Protein backbone atom coordinates (compact mmCIF):
# COMPACT_ATOMS: atom_id res chain seq x y z
CA UNK A 1 0.00 0.00 0.00
CA UNK A 2 1.23 3.45 -0.86
CA UNK A 3 1.14 6.53 1.34
CA UNK A 4 -1.09 8.47 -1.04
CA UNK A 5 -3.63 5.65 -0.79
CA UNK A 6 -4.02 5.96 2.98
CA UNK A 7 -3.54 9.70 3.41
CA UNK A 8 -7.32 10.23 3.66
CA UNK A 9 -7.54 7.56 6.35
CA UNK A 10 -4.79 9.33 8.29
CA UNK A 11 -6.56 12.70 7.93
CA UNK A 12 -9.85 11.23 9.13
CA UNK A 13 -8.22 9.63 12.16
CA UNK A 14 -6.37 12.84 13.07
CA UNK A 15 -9.60 14.85 12.86
CA UNK A 16 -11.05 12.70 15.66
CA UNK A 17 -8.24 13.55 18.07
CA UNK A 18 -8.34 16.44 20.54
CA UNK A 19 -5.84 19.22 21.15
CA UNK A 20 -2.96 17.89 23.24
CA UNK A 21 -3.52 14.24 22.27
CA UNK A 22 -0.29 12.42 21.51
CA UNK A 23 -0.12 9.52 19.10
CA UNK A 24 2.07 7.28 17.02
CA UNK A 25 1.19 6.58 13.42
CA UNK A 26 0.51 2.96 14.40
CA UNK A 27 -2.25 4.27 16.72
CA UNK A 28 -4.27 5.72 13.85
CA UNK A 29 -3.70 3.21 11.03
CA UNK A 30 -3.23 -0.55 11.07
CA UNK A 31 0.27 -1.88 10.44
CA UNK A 32 1.93 1.18 8.90
CA UNK A 33 4.88 0.27 6.71
CA UNK A 34 8.16 2.05 7.41
CA UNK A 35 8.04 4.20 4.28
CA UNK A 36 4.58 5.47 5.29
CA UNK A 37 6.01 6.77 8.55
CA UNK A 38 8.73 8.62 6.69
CA UNK A 39 6.24 10.20 4.28
CA UNK A 40 3.95 11.22 7.15
CA UNK A 41 6.88 12.84 9.00
CA UNK A 42 7.77 14.83 5.86
CA UNK A 43 4.17 16.00 5.54
CA UNK A 44 4.08 17.07 9.20
CA UNK A 45 7.39 18.92 8.82
CA UNK A 46 6.13 20.64 5.63
CA UNK A 47 2.82 21.76 7.17
CA UNK A 48 0.52 19.43 5.24
CA UNK A 49 -1.08 18.56 8.59
CA UNK A 50 -0.96 21.99 10.26
CA UNK A 51 -2.56 20.81 13.50
CA UNK A 52 0.06 18.08 14.06
CA UNK A 53 3.54 18.54 15.49
CA UNK A 54 6.42 16.12 15.89
CA UNK A 55 7.22 15.46 19.56
CA UNK A 56 9.99 12.89 19.75
CA UNK A 57 11.35 9.68 18.31
CA UNK A 58 10.99 6.82 20.76
CA UNK A 59 12.84 3.75 19.59
CA UNK A 60 11.91 3.38 15.95
CA UNK A 61 8.60 5.27 16.16
CA UNK A 62 7.88 8.98 15.91
CA UNK A 63 5.48 10.51 18.42
CA UNK A 64 3.17 13.35 17.38
CA UNK A 65 0.83 15.77 19.18
CA UNK A 66 -2.30 17.61 18.10
CA UNK A 67 -1.75 21.37 18.43
Image (cartoon, rainbow, N blue to C red):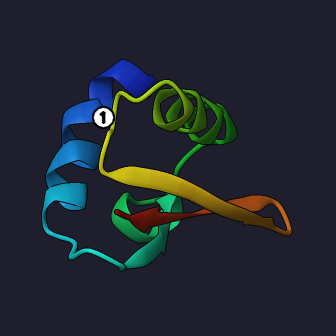
Q: Residue at x 43, y 26 (%)?
A: 3
Counting from the top left corner in percent of width and height, residue 55 is at 63, 64
Q: Residue at x 14, y 51 (%)?
A: 12
Q: Residue at x 22, y 72 (%)?
A: 17
Q: Residue at x 68, y 41 (%)?
A: 34
Counting from the top left corner in percent of width and height, residue 7 is at 29, 32
Counting from the top left corner in percent of width and height, residue 64 is at 52, 62
Q: Which quarter of the image is occupied by the N terminus?
A: top left
Q: Which quarter of the image is occupied by the C terminus?
A: bottom left
> With respect to residue 17, does 44 lie above or below?
above
Q: Report helix, strand or loop for mark 1.
A: helix
Q: Is residue 17 left or right of residue 4?
A: left
Residue nearest the observer in this picture, 49 or 13: 49
- Name the residue tied to disc 1: 6
Mark 1 residue crowding within 10 angstroms, few (<14) / some (14–19) / many (20+)? some
> With respect to residue 33, does 12 lie above or below?
below
> With respect to residue 28, does 51 lie above or below?
above
Residue nearest the observer in this picture, 38 or 48: 48
Amino acid sequence: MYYKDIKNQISTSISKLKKGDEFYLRDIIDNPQAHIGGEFRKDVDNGVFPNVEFVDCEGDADKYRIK
